[in-house]
């Protein structure tokens, strides 16, 4: 397969290979993929996946407007016994077009010149703040029996054996990952690393002072990367983008940072490529990736992203960069039920939140396995969740005494060090004499703990207690409305 690294204006590449061994996709080059102020077109190819001899033919256009053609400048000898041939072209194509790479079979003496150009479509960029969530209430039912299936969309049935139905009150909080999605020109083919992972994706941990370092997991397992692949499969089209994710939401803590990033990307692709699918259809597709994504796909959020993408249409690159304001994605609070596919929006209530982040995680699978051993509950208690919401709405503030999490006892069993840490923090909260003592709550399957509406003095004492146990703390709040800044 040929990979194009750089070119000036346009070119055409024709390879003589066994048709079964070549990538027949057409790949246009965007203007940004150039080496400026060079007298010749510089193109490097890497032929991989075959040991057959082949002939590579490059058609290069002149760099100047004087009608004089230049030959190709070869950077280095291509591998696998490939013979490069430079062919001049007498006419420079319009600047508004790009060349395509055309792969096809050639005879020994053939020089096939199939000029194929495509106009570069206006590209747009969305800069998004993807929020974390906490579970204010979480009720969990027994695992579904063997042979259980569910059909979320036209792609077919999914085996749901062993999955646990839930009823949960989700609330978004002001802790964000930053997701930047830039639409590339149609047909763009991203370079890949040795493991096949596209370099168009970068997922890093954001640190203070602008520093960052890569995440600990393979890039092809990141939910945002998988979400992009899913969108290309279900839409049946190439969706070329450059994605940069700077993560601040801790992983594996029950805050759904990865799900939020993936949901943001799916909505961004829908907006940037002007796909007609609504949030409900995106929620259906998201079930193939995880149960938390659907919560983040709120209709007003998607419409705001569509408007932001549309506002950049027809503008130049510098204008688009200025127009790419940071969009704060804030889905409305919701009751999430079933396997995550049922999302009922409810009133969002304000509350200060203090997050306590233990120095260890609670593996989701281990927690749910422990839940199966300690719980006798057959179905999630939807009525208990609804009662907590109703009492909160009646008072206009979250009823902290009505909050609960069915997975808390299981987390104490699954992770031995979690129980003592929880007990110490609970004692610190009681000693702080909170005016609204709802105690310490756990989000999701852990290990993140949170306390709502602590007074400043009490909050300071809790932070000190958490630090003595090796826990980081984050002051944040439950979000009540989406906003674009």
Image (cartoon, rainbow, N blue to C red):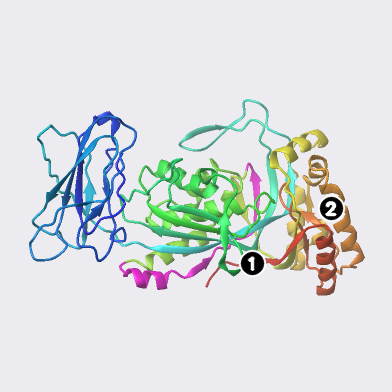
> What range is drawn magenta here?
314-339
The quarter holding residue 268 reads bottom left
Is 404 drawn above or below residue 353 in the view shown? above
Question: From the image, which quarter does the N terminus lie in?
Answer: top left
The residue indicated by pointer 2 is: 422
User: Residue 485: where, in percent of width, then height?
Assistant: 52, 73
Tell whether 41 sits left or right of 473: left
From this viewpoint, which residue is outermost toward the top? 147
Tell whether 427 sits left or right of 322: right
Tell whether 384 sits left or right of 173: right
Disc tally is 2
User: Residue 454: where, in percent of width, then height?
Assistant: 81, 68
Q: Is residue 403 visible?
A: no
User: Residue 414: where, in percent of width, then height?
Assistant: 79, 40
From this viewpoint, which residue is outermost toward the front? 76
Residue closer to the observer: 273 or 52:
52
Disc 1 or disc 2, which is closer to the eye?
2
The quarter holding residue 391 reads bottom right
Is 180 drawn above or below residue 44 in the view shown? below
* Mark carried by residue 480: 1
- Whichever of callouts 1 and 2 sits on the residue coming sooner in the sequence is 2
User: Residue 34: where, in percent of width, then height?
Assistant: 28, 59
Q: Secondary structure at mark 1?
A: loop
């Amino acid at each position: 397969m040929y990979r194009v690294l750089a070119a000036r204006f346009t070119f055409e590449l024709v390879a003589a290979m066994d048709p079964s061994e070549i990538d027949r996709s057409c790949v246009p080059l965007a203007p940004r993929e150039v080496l400026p102020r060079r007298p010749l077109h510089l193109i490097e190819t890497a032929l991989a996946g075959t040991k057959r001899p082949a002939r590579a033919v490059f058609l290069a256009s002149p760099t100047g407007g004087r009608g004089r053609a230049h030959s190709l400048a070869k950077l280095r000898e291509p591998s696998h016994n490939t013979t490069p041939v430079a062919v001049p072209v007498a006419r420079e194509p319009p600047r508004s077009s790009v060349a395509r790479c055309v792969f096809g079979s050639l005879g020994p003496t053939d020089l096939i010149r199939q000029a194929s150009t495509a106009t570069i479509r206006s590209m747009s960029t969305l800069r998004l703040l993807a929020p974390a969530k906490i579970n204010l209430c979480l009720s969990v039912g027994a695992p579904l029996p063997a042979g259980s299936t569910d059909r979320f969309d036209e792609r077919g049935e999914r085996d749901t054996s062993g999955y646990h139905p839930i009823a949960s009150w989700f609330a978004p909080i002001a802790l964000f990952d930053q997701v930047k999605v830039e639409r590339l020109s149609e047909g763009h083919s991203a370079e890949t690393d040795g493991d096949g992972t596209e370099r168009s994706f970068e997922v890093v941990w954001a640190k203070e002072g602008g520093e960052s370092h890569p995440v600990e997991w393979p890039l092809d397992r990141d939910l945002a990367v998988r979400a992009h692949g899913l969108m290309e499969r279900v839409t049946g089209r190439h969706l070329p983008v450059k994605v940069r994710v700077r993560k601040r939401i801790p992983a594996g803590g029950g805050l759904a940072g990865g799900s939020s990033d993936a949901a943001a990307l799916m909505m961004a692709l829908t907006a940037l490529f002007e796909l007609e699918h609504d949030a409900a259809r995106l929620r259906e597709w998201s079930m193939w990736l995880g149960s938390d994504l659907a919560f983040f796909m709120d209709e007003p959020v998607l419409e705001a992203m569509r408007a932001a993408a549309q506002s950049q249409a027809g503008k130049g690159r510098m204008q688009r960069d200025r127009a790419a304001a940071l969009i704060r994605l804030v889905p409305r609070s919701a009751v999430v039920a079933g396997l995550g596919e049922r999302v009922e929006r409810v009133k969002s209530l304000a509350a200060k939140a203090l997050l306590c982040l233990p120095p260890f995680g609670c593996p989701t699978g281990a927690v749910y396995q422990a839940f199966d051993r300690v719980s006798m509950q057959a179905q999630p208690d939807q009525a208990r969740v609804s009662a907590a919401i109703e009492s909160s709405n009646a008072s206009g503030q979250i009823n902290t005494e009505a909050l609960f999490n069915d997975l808390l006892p299981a987390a104490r069993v699954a992770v031995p060090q979690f129980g003592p840490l929880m007990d110490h923090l609970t004692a610190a909260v009681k000693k702080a004499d909170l005016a609204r003592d709802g105690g310490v709550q756990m989000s999701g399957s852990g290990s993140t703990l949170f306390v709502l509406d602590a007074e400043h003095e009490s909050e300071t004492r809790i932070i000190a207690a958490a630090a003595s146990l090796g826990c980081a703390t984050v002051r944040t709040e439950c979000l009540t409305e989406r906003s674009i800044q």
